[in-house]
Amino acid sequence: MTELLSIKEASSWASKYLSKDVTTSNISYLIQYGRVPKIGDNGNTYVNRYDLENYYNQNSLTKEEIWKEKLGNDLNWTLSFSNFKESETTKHVHRLHPYKGKFIPQLVEYFLDNHTDKFKKEVFFARGDVVLDPFCGSGTTLVQASELGINAIGIDISAFNTLISNVKVGKYDFSDIESTYHEITKRLKEFQKGKNNLTFESELLEELKIFNLKNFPSPEFKYKVSQKTIDEKKYGKEKENEFLNTYERLIRKYKIELKQKEDTTFVDKWFLQVVRDEIDFVFEQIKKIKNKQTKKVLSVVLSRTIRSCRATTHSDLATLFEPQITTYYCKKHGKICKPLFSILSWWERYSKDTLKRLKEFNHLRTETHQRCLRGDSRSINIFSELEKQNSDLAKITREEKIDGIFSSPPYVGLIDYHEQHAYAYDLYGFERNDNSEIGPLFKGQGKQARESYLNGIAEVLLNSKKYMKKNYDVFLVANDKHGLYPKIAELAGMKIVNQYKRPVLNRVEKDRTAYAEIIFHLREK
């Protein structure tokens, strides 16, 4: 028995069946990713109502119910922010540059703003206050503090993190940024005229289009994979090898350079030679920019650009394995994909996107002060360092002192915060302070590493207390699977007065298993 529904009809039917809004985009997603089979051709797409009903019946539990089954009923679903779209959790400057391990802005807003609810029963910060983030990362706390009319100080051991954070909260001559990136783009296009990579890539794309249309029709191929009627790994490898003949023929035809002569640094190893040539060219143009603020913005744009142009597969962007210098079967897209041979399209896209995001934030920011200081939070003299970089914020902080902390400390042995941006450290020559990181990946999660971490976080809190009011509030976001934070609080002369357990839905890593973290609320003992 069949009952064919158009996408619009399916949207209406599903909305009534589930008693919630199901958009046409939701239905299209199910078709595109093979959750339900597509029926029809010649531009007319239908689904079988019984296929749709069967899918929803098999996935009837809500996400909240599924996660609470795995993580416990003490999960605070309010703090999941599941009602927010990705565009809202990555709003304006929060997506200026990828950063592994950052929290979403709504979490910061929840604790910094002046609302109360059944979980948050009091207001902790007010307009004009000063909040500290001693593990500033990519600057989320600073940005949200600005929106809420709160002054903010960040500290980070990483030179690159400091750059990202300060670029997000900086003030700019937007016309200068726009004219400068247009000029650099123009010069890059002139530089490319003496190269073959654009013509080569254009012909390669045309060949890929024909090959993929024939061998990986969408969405039929993904549906067959989801139904296990085709061995994706075996079939993908066969077609990958089949297309290599075409790829190698075009490489020879256009004399494209692939590997660089050296592979001693990250930028030597992870970029094709034709891409490296363009990176070096744009970098030289950025060095010549006279306006320091414009130079910083376009440095971040170039960093974001080259991150997207690394010679790796689409599924390995977060965790690099081996440089990918040939076409390959892409599990993420279900077809044959290719490495990049030019930075031009990404440079143009990110230049425009960055300018747009900076302008959006400029309309939301308040006349308060935010600054990220580079240094070790265990020992930095906040007052003296602040005086060098923002005398107005230094004056406010000396007179009023810091009202509290909102921060996400590093986790034990989980992320290498310097290595994740190794390309930028190599290109810009930033000094690395890997050995000064608290809880770095290379130290692991053993007893000695946990002890070092415990003492490190406690030292940060003790140093921070020198600059804070007596009635401070400290909020630390952590996945404390080793149970270290009660001892950390004790060593810092603090007590844990509340804990908020939240599900983490917005993860960029491949591991999508149910995962929770705790927001520890600490006060003076």
Image: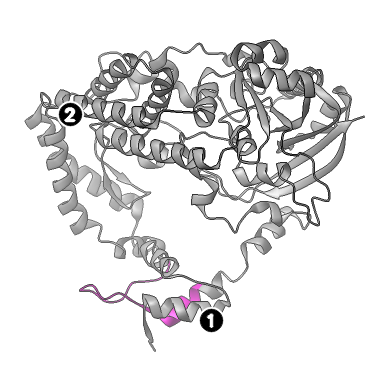
Q: Quadrant of residue 248?
A: top left
**Which residue is at 41% across, 38% downward?**
316
The quadrant of the rendering that contains the C terminus is top right
Expressed as whole percent of the image width and height from the top left, the position of residue 193 reads 11, 27
Report whether 459 appears left or right of 431: right
| Residue lying farthest to the left in this orientation | 253
Is 75 inside the magenta-drawn segment? no
Give residue 491's position: percent from left, percent from top. 86, 22
Looking at the image, which residue is at 55% across and 72% down?
58
Q: Is residue 387 above or below residue 494?
A: above
84 vs 320, nearest the viewer: 84
Callout in the foreground (1, 2): 2
Residue 50 in the magenta stretch? The answer is yes
Residue 456 appears left or right of 441: right
Asked whether the residues under the numbered discs 1 and 2 touch, taking CB atoms below 8 Å apart as contact, a structural biologist would say: no
Q: Is 432 or 394 nearer to us in this picture?
A: 394
Q: Split into 4 quadrants, where in the image is the N terminus?
A: bottom left
Q: Is residue 322 visible?
A: no
Which residue position is annotated with label 2?
Answer: 189
Q: Residues within 10 Å of mark 1 (few under 14, many from 20)?
A: few
What are the residue bounds of the magenta stretch?
A: 35-55
Cα distance between the residues tagged 1 and 2: 53 Å
Q: How has the structure been colored for display?
A: one colour
Q: Quick one: label 2, few (<14), some, or many (20+) residues within 10 Å?
A: few
SS for tag 2?
A: helix
Give the quarter of the image for residue 213.
Answer: bottom left
Q: Amino acid at mark 1?
A: Lys
Q: Residue 4: image x %, image y %?
A: 36, 84
Q: Which residue is mark 1?
A: 16
Q: Is residue 514 above or below residue 10?
A: above
Mark number displayed over residue 113: none
Residue 507 picture location, percent across and down: 55, 45
